[in-house]
Image (tube, rainbow, N blue to C red):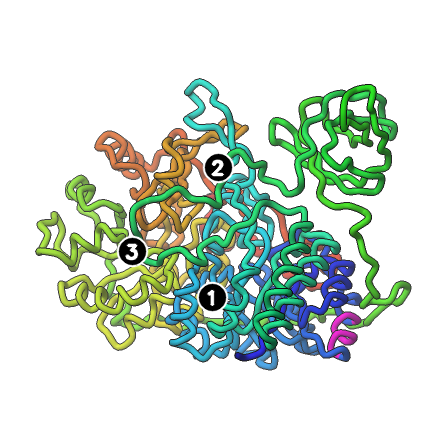
Amino acid sequence: MQSVELLAPAGSPEALDAAIGEGADGVYLGLKTFNARMRSANFTYPQFETALQRLHRMGRKVYVTVNTVFEQREADRLYQLLRYLAALGPDALIIQDLGLIRLVREYVPSLKLHASTQMNVASSRGVNLLSKYGLSRVVLARELSLEEIQDIRSHTNMELEVFVHGALCVSASGLCLFSSYLGGKSANRGMCTQGCRRSFRPGGPEEAPARGGYYFSPSDLQLFEQVPALAAAGVHAFKIEGRMKSADYVGAVVSAYRKLIDALSGNEAQIHEALTRGQAILRQDFAREKTTFYAFTPTQAGPAVPVAWLQADRNGGTGIPLGRILKVQGAGADRRALIQGGDPLPGLGDSVRFHRADDRDRESHKLRFMQEAPQQGPRMCWISLPPGFETGDAVYLIQRKELSKGYTPVIPSGRKGGRRQPGWEQAPELRLPKVSKVQRSLFPEGLYLAVSRLEDLYLLQASHPARVMLHYTRKTAAALLGPTPRLPFKSPEIILVLDPYFPQALSRLFEEEIPALMQAGYRQFVVNNLGHCPYFRGTQAALIAGPYLYSFNRWAQAFLSGLGLDYAVTPLENNRQNLERTVEPPRRPFTFITLFAYPALFRIRADLGATYAFRRFTDSRDASFTLINNREGSLLIPDQPLSLVDKLPFLEAAGFSRFILDLSGPPLKKGVYQDLMRGVKNAQPLAHTSRFNWKNGFSSPPAGLKSLTGRDSEGLRVRPLEPNPIPGNKVTL
């Protein structure tokens, strides 16, 4: 059995100390920008340089997370960061944006690259494609079964890394749009607000209020017992999630996994002893209930069964419940709360989390005061209380002071650290090659209508679309590959839209289905996952890069163009200004813009139809959502769709000429469809719709960016925004 690497999170210098003190082989950490945990403490440049030097002397590895998508205006800042990192020499960068592959390989080739789980690679085809572009490791998607991981291993020589412990996302990694839709705080930009952890109530806002629950807050991953099997499967690195966790949490989890990994080279008795000791340690991590997630889930879709890793009655936060606040007294720093207390009672210096009963606020707090209150009842106590919390709010114990350990600092206190800073370089200018004559003729200009059900195609005939798009699901696959279906459109008029989540279990099916589809005349596809691309190599297929390949910048466009994907659908999260900066006028005719859609806010690899009998959910702000279930998985869509139909004339004036109305989602109704087409014809705004990020963009720039000119607080040079990017266009889209 090969040796495996234990990789720990370092969201702060204290967590770094704990990870190294307990024996992690390496750590992954972020700087103040371009990483997927912008809300963690992260590292300053002097701290990072010192830590890197000391850890390398200790024989430990350092991986830097640059795992967010970047906008075109940030190209200078990112290039400066890459040059800075190349001068220091971390062991690898963990990346999400496809543009980074092109930028690094062309201009800073000394940097080693690993694919983040945010890149959503879940198949051997996707792994091997990245290998050809110089990446040396892939962090696999977390929704894979052990069987699928074994199958991927048997088809690639690439290093594979898997998450074995920590918090989970209910949505497939890299495909969650929920936080972004609610307010521009995109998970793909490291600003996720964890809206999935909030309380929802069944039904719509117009219905009588029902009891709320945490319907989309998953348990925490724990594959501790599966470590021997994963090691035997050829996994190269085991990764612990937790860059927003405390140092005590990191230390405890690392120590448990370290003991077990070290025991793998011993006999069965030694492994059993390490398992027993590690399980005892992990029971003290004060996190959520544990799950093995999909590790032992059959890879073939079967009858829907209830999902065990979603428990609606469990609070979305972590910790041991201590009950609710019974009384409040005092004011300011002397404010106190009476709680039930639990057994044993919390102690002075312990950390607790207060959670508002209406689910609007949570706050961690170290107890400055604790006094038992036997006169109030058994096991009750008074504890210090921060402002903003009242009677009825919940309290959770998240860390005991007595379990805290002291670790030798990796970065010595009082030491200023390194002095290097990113420079002032501008990113190289990038001009994409012209689209060939053959490519220019593949897709006509005009309106493209997308649906997810074959029966909905019949409603589209009267509109005479340039093409129709049909989402390729197991149900539509069965119809298209069965006896020749009678459809209102011929196969050359239909573009098949492949799903962005592409697990290894589907990979084998596609080997037979794609050639069969092309033989039947279906030769136009929207590819949404890197794993889709190899199936079309050497064929006559006409391909479009879907919105989930995230072309937020010209470098990503260049990478996709190198794959033969000159046509691309701009991401649903994109905004007007970034679209104008990214897509130069010669490329605008080959960029599809989605004017209407019910965006999938969660893509869940589970049929929740057996778990929840209802389909609509409403949050505390009366925003409502609908769950769409089938044997392949579940989608959560907003009841308020994205609509930019009134912007069509301005977009055409700007040089864009291909537009999508995506009617997949709820069952298509004739009246709704007619209203939509009337809005398109008259360029009128539609009622009860959302602009998503179109007008305001992402809610805030990355941490450290103070202005749009000069230098930011981290010393990175910023290029000023270009005024009026579209020549001659005086209208704000």
For the stretch drawn in magenta, the main secondary structure is helix
The magenta segment: 50-56
**Image height check: is 686 above or below 38?**
above
**Image height check: is 317 above or below 38?**
above
Residue 482 x %, y %: 13, 56
Question: In the structure shown, which secondary structural element does the residue marked by tag 1 occupy?
Answer: helix
Question: In the structure shown, which secondary structural element does the residue marked by tag 3 occupy?
Answer: strand
Quadrant including the C terminus: top left
Q: Residue at x 57, y 56 (%)?
A: 722
Q: Is residue 308 left or right of residue 260?
A: left
State how far apart marks 1 and 2 are (Cα). Answer: 35 Å
Dot placed on the residue nearer the N-terminal end, 1 or 3: 3
Q: Residues within 10 Å of mark 2 (few under 14, many from 20)?
A: many
At label 2, which amino acid type do we have? Tyr
**Image height check: is 514 above or below 397?**
below
Residue 681 magenta: no
Quadrant hosting residue 713: bottom right
